[in-house]
Structure formats: structure tokens, C-alpha cells
Image (cartoon, grey):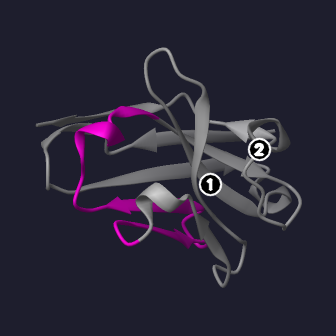
Amino acid sequence: QVQLVESGGGLVQAGGSLRLSCAASGRTGSINVMGWFRQAPGKERDFVAAISWSGSNTYYTDSVKGRFTISRDNVKNTVYLQMNSLKPEDTAVYYCAARRPNNIVVVVRQYDYWGQGTQVTVSS
């Protein structure tokens, strides 16, 4: 099994920045793609960004392109999401996810492991 623990969420004003971290433990050798999803109240969980094992491939949902950056440190088994120019519509619980295959996908059910989530609130 793999355990994922997110950190770094909080309250920030519009235009501000936050950096989320997700530390993986357990059978980390089995995971390849790591990603971030978010879920706003009353809405479905949506894809935000993902990164391949080597870090050479990344993919973002359109609404965060140019503002968010995903990266990973495989020595620390940690993936990061740097979020800049935050907007009130970025407010959500952000979830870290990991999957065993090394191709990036955006579908929730195709990720094998999930963290508990961290709240990000952006005030206007």
C-alpha cells in the first residue's frame, strides 16, 4: 500500500500564492504518475495537474495553466503544487493522488491512491 499526506493548504487573499506538498510512504516504488485534484463544495472532484515519474511530462487543466506548477522530488517521495495568482474560484479541498501506470490521465477512478485532502481558501 501507499500512503499520501498533503500539507500546505490555508487561507490566502486573491493574487497570493500557496505551495502544496504531498509526501508518499509505503510501497512508493509501485507508483509512477502523481497528480492533484480539487473538489469545491457541492461539486465533483476535478483534475488539476499531474506529473510523470521522471518529471519530464506534466499536464494541467486549462484553468490553472500559467499559474500552477507541479513538480516532484523522487528522493523525498514528494510532489509539489506551486499555486500563484490564486483566484477565489480556486477555493477547494485539494487532493493528492498517485497511480501505478506511467501515463498521465485525468480521470479520478484511474488513480490508485489518494490523500485525505488539504483545504485551500482564496478570499476576494
In the shown orientation, is residue 75 left or right of residue 90? right
- From which residue to which does the magenta span run? 66-93
Depth check: 88 or 32 in front? 88
Q: Is residue 9 above or below residue 80?
A: above
In the rendered image, the residue lying farthest to the bottom is 56
Q: Residue at x 49, y 14 (%)?
A: 42
In the rendered image, the residue lying farthest to the front is 62
In the rendered image, the residue lying farthest to the top is 42
Q: Which amino acid type is marked by label 1?
A: Gly
Q: Which residue is mark 2?
A: 107
Labelled disc at residue 119: none
Depth check: 75 or 123 in front? 123
In the rendered image, the residue lying farthest to the right is 101
Q: Residue at x 20, y 57 (%)?
A: 17
Marks 1 and 2 sit apart, C-alpha to C-alpha, by 11 Å
Q: Residue at x 51, y 61 (%)?
A: 62
Q: Is residue 102 above or below residue 98?
A: below
Q: Which residue is mark 1?
A: 35
